[in-house]
Amino acid sequence: MASRGLKICLAMSLLFLIIVAIVIVALFFTIFRPKDPNIIVHPVGFENFNPSLLTNVTANVSLGMLITIENSNYENFEYPNATGYIKFHDTVVGQVPIVGELVPPRSQINVNTSANFMVAKLINDPNFLSDFLSGIVNFTSTASLPGKAHMLKIIKFKATVYSSCDISLNITSRNVDSKCISKIKL
Ligand SMILES: *[C@@H]1O[C@H](CO)[C@@H](O)[C@H](O)[C@H]1NC(C)=O
Ligand SMILES: *[C@@H]1O[C@H](CO)[C@@H](O)[C@H](O)[C@H]1NC(C)=O
Ligand SMILES: *[C@@H]1O[C@H](CO)[C@@H](O)[C@H](O)[C@H]1NC(C)=O
Ligand SMILES: *[C@@H]1O[C@H](CO)[C@@H](O)[C@H](O)[C@H]1NC(C)=O
Ligand SMILES: *[C@@H]1O[C@H](CO)[C@@H](O)[C@H](O)[C@H]1NC(C)=O
Ligand SMILES: *[C@@H]1O[C@H](CO)[C@@H](O)[C@H](O)[C@H]1NC(C)=O
């Protein structure tokens, strides 16, 4: 009889463990499953930009950038200082320093920074003149943030966020349009 009670007890414990394991796995794939963040890179101050600055080919021109990072996960996302790159066609024409931050779970932060455009590289690109005259100059920005996600100091893993944006400047209206895609990889 005692051994039958023991068997039942073992079976119950095993069942309990299986249920706990299923719940943990289910939680991991639902709540903890990393969701892509939402990153928007938006140049600011282009309205006041003076195009005559582009005539000094030895200069670097800086343009303010507002970066909004929205973390849709249940973990904190923390990343160190990083650099974003701005490309015109296939040439890197600018750099964007990004100061490391912690983005709390399910919230968003704004990061102010300024892009450093190398005028010589931009002007010397064979596509620049025709694009400028067409009234629209397109750039792409890319950044990777090799950070970590953590929650309650227990769950902690490396996570890298990749962001890429198409930024379109309308020279006549001084209007800025940006479309961004972001991915998180563990
Ligand atoms: C061009 O830019 C360089 C570096 O910023 C500066 O030293 C120089 O005075 C500028 N030249 C003109 C004509 O504005
Ligand atoms: C412009 O920026 C580049 C790259 O950041 C740097 O190497 C160069 O010294 C800068 N030039 C000036 C005039 O600030
Ligand atoms: C990150 O950049 C900021 C501003 O440039 C600087 O004050 C800080 O020391 C940097 N942090 C690290 C870890 O390099
Ligand atoms: C970013 O700069 C804008 C003005 O340029 C300011 O209103 C805003 O408070 C700044 N945001 C942060 C997070 O510093
Ligand atoms: C710039 O981008 C816009 C939208 O992303 C596109 O419609 C347009 O053709 C592009 N213009 C050039 C000159 O590449
Ligand atoms: C740029 O903006 C102006 C004024 O809003 C508009 O008329 C023009 O069509 C825009 N250019 C392009 C290529 O979209």
Image: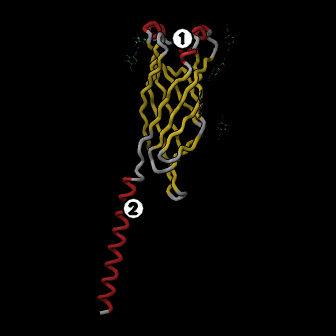
Disc 1 and disc 2 in contact, CB within 8 angstroms: no
Please indicate whether residue 48 sits to the left or right of residue 14 in the image. Answer: right
State how many labels appear.
2
Asked which secondary structure carries label 2, the reply is helix
Q: Please tell me which residue is depicted at 46% across the width and 22% down the height of the picture.
A: 167
Residue 57 as seen in the image, left or right of residue 149: right
Secondary structure category for the residue under label 1: helix
Which of the two discs, 1 and 2, labels the residue nearer the N terminus? 2
State whether residue 18 is above or below residue 57.
Answer: below
Residue 126 showing in the rendered view: no
Instruction: Give ligand 5's quarter of the image.
Output: top left
Front one among 5 and 64: 64
The residue under label 2 is 24
For the point 47% across and 17% down, the residue is 175
Q: Position of residue 51 (x, y in %)?
A: 56, 10
Give the camera-side residue of 49 and 122. Answer: 49
Q: Which mark is residue 123?
A: 1
Residue type, numbered disc 2: Ile
Q: Quadrant of residue 37?
A: top left
- Give percent across and percent down for residue 32: 42, 53
Q: Is ligand 1 closer than 8 angstroms to the Cβ of mark 1?
A: no
Closer to the eye: label 1 or 2:
2
Q: Give the vertical position of 101 relative to 165 (above or below).
A: below
Q: Quadrant of residue 53?
A: top right
Which residue is at a point 53% across and 27% down the rendered structure image? 85
Q: Position of residue 43 (x, y in %)?
A: 52, 24
On the question of residue 66 being in view, the answer is yes
- Label 1 amino acid? Ile
The disc placed on residue 113 is none
